[in-house]
Amino acid sequence: MFKILNLSNIFFWIERLIGFINSIFFILLLVALSFALIFSPPDYLQGDSVRIMYVHVPSAWIGLASFSSISILSIAYFIFKIKNIKLITKSIAPIGLMFTCLALVTGSIWGQPTWGTWWAWDARITSMLILALFYIGFISTHKFIADENKANKISSIIAIIGLINIPIIKYSVDWWNTLHQPASIKLTGESSIHSSMLMPLLLMFFVLILYCALIFLMKYKTEIIRIKKKNLKRL
Amino acid sequence: MLPKKVKKRASLLAITLLVSVTGIFFILQSLSKNILYFKSPTDIKNNQNIIFDKKIRVGGMVKKNSLIIKEEEIKFVITDFNNELNISFSGTVPNLFSEEKGVVAEGKLQDKTFFIADRILAKHDENYMPPELKDMMKKNAK
């Protein structure tokens, strides 16, 4: 049973997966970007600035999804103390931080021409900023605390507390008056975004997910190499 | 069965989470007035002690046929479909500002029905569609 958890086996599968994703990633990226930037129609109100959404929305989704998975894995780590989980969460965190910042920056660039301001302290934007701070807290505990066990414990507590912020971000636009518009794509019911724009959006989301997987696998590989250097055969 | 240590950690975690969720819930509850990015005309009408010398933000829909653009002043009425508020503004407006669209105005209340804004933000709604479709919808509406 533990054979599959053997680090050499994991390593072998990671190598193969990276190769596979690399072979399709750039073609899919070109297709998705050309749909998002060239073939999709401009918006009736915003014109071409709607194209920022094709990066902004998937980035925000990925930022939220990464943090949720880090939190849930951290709960498992905190209870069962499986070291491998910590390697995984450590590899996801920088990706999540990057996409959260990307969502904030692209949102700001979009906000200037449409709303008339770069930044607004409304509930959605502020809670998204808090998410970025949680990511920074999570990553920096591993950088600043030398004792590994202690760092693992503190960072998983940060991630678990941060889980409360996730529903606040999601529902902030429904609970309070915000400058940010409510969600266009709903889990139930019809989405208020036209299909000619929804298709490139989902395509971009898929491509960015592939990109995340690629970076995650590379980072995870590095963490495994680091463990191997300490001469541990198994986690 | 799970070892005792694991059970202990799980219950510790459950209690911590429960305490922090209730804590944050009460914090948000008491802050909820401050979290609101803008007040609606109804909020202003119902509020007994309005502060006139402090900047606030009001928001709503720009009422149809209420927009008057003069040389140095823009006047319009915002509505939340229950109550209305007159707004006066001089300056540049964002691209998306128009009638029957959401708007947030920052400035000072003069009295309960009149507001002088020194900044206008346009609020975008959650609808995205190509221009041809919008034209078709307009034709169908006629």
Image (tube, helix red, strand yellow):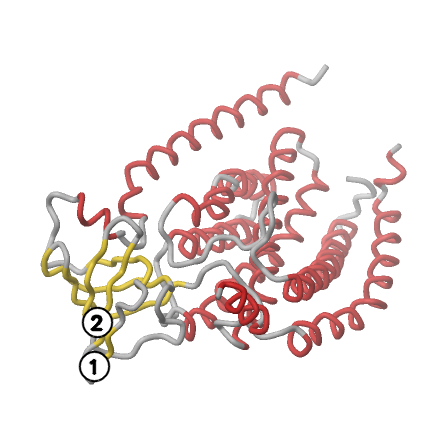
Q: Are marks 2 and 1 on the same chain?
A: yes
Which chain's residue wears label 1? B
The image quarter in which residue A201 lies:
bottom right
- The structure residue drawn at horizontal position 86% and vertical position 35%, both measured from the top left corner, is A2
Side (left or right) of A30 relative to A68: right
Q: Position of residue A66 (x, y in %)?
A: 62, 50
Q: Nearer the viewer, residue A117 or A47?
A: A47
Q: Nearer the viewer, residue A206 or A183?
A: A183
Q: Position of residue A218 (x, y in %)?
A: 75, 60
Q: Is residue A197 above or below residue A69?
A: below
Q: Position of residue A59 (x, y in %)?
A: 59, 60
Q: Which mark is residue B70?
A: 1
Q: Is residue A80 above or below residue A53?
A: above
The CA span between labels 2 and 1 is 8 Å
- The structure residue drawn at horizontal position 44% and vertical position 56%, both measured from the top left corner, is A129
Q: Is residue A61 above or below residue A32?
A: above
Label 2 crowding class (10 Å Cα cut-off): few <14, some 14-19, many 20+?
some
Q: Position of residue B17 (x, y in %)?
A: 49, 30
The image quarter in which residue B56 lies:
bottom left
Q: Which mark is residue A115?
A: none
Q: Nearer the viewer, residue B123 or B68?
A: B68
The image quarter in which residue B123 lies:
bottom left
The residue tagged 2 is: B75
Q: Amino acid at mark 1?
A: Lys
- The structure residue drawn at horizontal position 68% and vertical position 66%, both measured from the top left corner, is A200
Say which element carries label 1.
Answer: loop
Which part of the image, by quadrant, shows the N terminus of chain A? top right
Please report contact status of discs 2 and 1: CB closer than 8 Å, yes or no. Answer: yes
Q: Nearer the viewer, residue A119 or A184?
A: A184
Which part of the image, by quadrant, shows the C terminus of chain A? top right
